[in-house]
Image: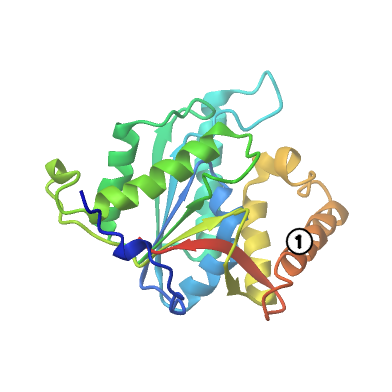
Amino acid sequence: MNPNLYEELPAAPTPLSVPERVLTIGAHPDDAEFGAGATLARWADQGAKITIVVVTDGSKGSWDPHEDQVALVERRKDEQRAAATAVGASDIVFLGHTDGELEYSGALRNELAELIRRLEPEVVLTHDPWQRYQMHPDHRVTGLASVDAVVSAREPLAHSAAGLDHHRPEAIMLWSADEPDHVESVDDRYFNRKIDALMCHSSQSVTTMGDAAATPELRLQFENKMREWMQQSITRFDVPMGELFKRLTP
């Protein structure tokens, strides 16, 4: 058996131009904004049509054991809608899987592959499923299912029962990657849009943002921490500020 290894041969990737259609797949409301909010805002301003997919319902996103989970799910949907407006996304898809209980399955992979075929994105952004020591199972599962879905969506003979033509994105971009090799440069305008979008997720202020919504001082601390992280993490790239990704060519 002679496998075709042509696509595995290393080659320098061409620079990534602003895509016309973008699909961002996050496990929870706010994951897309943390991972790529500034990049999404810049692309949206430059004409990209951005769809944000939220895989789970966000029902575990509270440290209050008495939280009304039904109300929390609806609140987090509203927050995600506001955040999508802040970054300039044109559409949101809520898949509604139970937060904290996401499991890898062929059904999940096919659900995402069908979205990729229907929306025909040039770029798919998601979690790095191979990030070392990533504790949240939803992040790991979402990243792996998304990458596998791109493979299913690109193959003419895979996932053909949906009746949609196959589609091959030009790039997969993984945020929170251990070995990033791609940077999207942003300036203060888009950094501020990222922060504004994150602040829309007020239900998560305590759990993920140091209670940044509580006071102007705490918000400033959060902004400064995010700015420092975005500037320091790109030191090997010749840009003043940016978001880092592992870039894969499907």
Residue shown at 41% from the left, 77% from the top: 47
Tell me: residue 95, above or below residue 26: above
Task: Assess disc 1: are there few (<14), some (14-19) or many (≥20) residues with their C-alpha within 10 Å of its C-alpha.
Answer: some
Residue shown at 70% from the left, 73% from the top: 236
The spot of residue 58 in percent (x, y) is 54, 34
Q: Nearer the viewer, residue 223 or 135?
A: 135
From the viewer's perspective, is 191 left or right of 71?
right
From the viewer's perspective, is 197 left or right of 5?
right
Q: Quadrant of the C terminus?
A: bottom left
Residue shown at 68% from the left, 79% from the top: 239
Residue shown at 47% from the left, 37% from the top: 141
Tell me: residue 6, above or below residue 176: below
Q: Which residue is mark 1?
A: 229
The spot of residue 111 in percent (x, y) is 30, 40
Tell me: residue 38, above or below residue 176: below
The spot of residue 198 in percent (x, y) is 64, 54
Extreme residue in the right direction: 217
